[in-house]
Image (cartoon, rainbow, N blue to C red):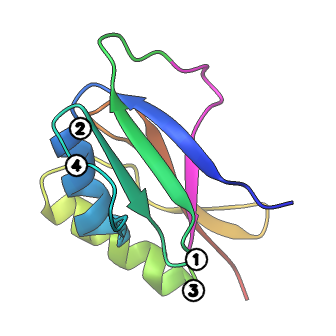
């Protein structure tokens, strides 16, 4: 069975799109709408993330989406890019054989970036 998509409610669709494209390499899904109210993005494996504007975004404390990187260097590079982009992001740390950090994105979603260690 293949996961079809994940739907995210966000407070600001254009801001979410800009961050997902700029820092996480997502791209617009061909033939799908892109408005201030909704858009559809694909990752490198063509997994679909639909993004819809929501007035009050509330996720459970444990909810997040994660982006797996090929190396710890890539985790550090994304962390540096986010920091240089003006975001406050806790430093990556080792946890259960991984290098990881969590980013409280300003549009209401927590994003994890991680890579397995050696």
Residue at the spot of label 4:
34
Name the residue at 27% across, 25% down. Answer: 11
Going from N to C along the chain, the mark reached first, 3 or 4, is 4
For the N terminus, the quadrant is bottom right
As measured in the structure, the alpha-carbon distance from the residue carrying label 3 to the one carrying label 4 is: 32 Å
Instruction: Please tell me whether mark 1 sits on a helix, a strand or a loop.
Output: loop
The residue stretch that appears in magenta: 59-68
**Which of pointers 3 and 1 indicates the residue nearer the eye?**
1
Name the residue at 39% across, 58% down. Answer: 41
Instruction: Please tell me whether mark 4 sits on a helix, a strand or a loop.
Output: loop
Name the residue at 57% across, 86% down. Answer: 71
Q: Is residue 73 magenta?
A: no
Going from N to C along the chain, the mark reached first, 4 or 2, is 2
Going from N to C along the chain, the mark reached first, 2 or 1, is 2
Chief secondary structure of the magenta portion: loop
Above or below for 29 versus 8: below
Asked if the residue under mark 4 is in contact with the one under mark 3, i.e. CB atoms within 8 Å, the reply is no
Q: Which mark is residue 71?
A: 3
Residue at the spot of label 1:
45
């Amino acid at each position: 069975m293949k996961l079809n998509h994940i739907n995210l409610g966000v407070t600001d669709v254009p801001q979410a799109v800009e961050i997902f494209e700029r820092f996480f390499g997502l791209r617009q899904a061909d033939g799908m709408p892109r408005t201030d109210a909704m858009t559809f993005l694909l990752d490198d494996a063509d997994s679909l993330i639909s993004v819809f504007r929501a007035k009050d975004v509330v996720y459970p404390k444990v909810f997040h989406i994660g982006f797996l990187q090929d190396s710890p260097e890539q985790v550090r590079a994304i962390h540096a890019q986010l920091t240089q982009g003006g975001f406050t992001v806790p430093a990556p740390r080792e946890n259960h054989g991984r290098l990881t950090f969590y980013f409280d994105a300003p549009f209401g979603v927590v994003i994890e970036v991680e890579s397995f260690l050696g």
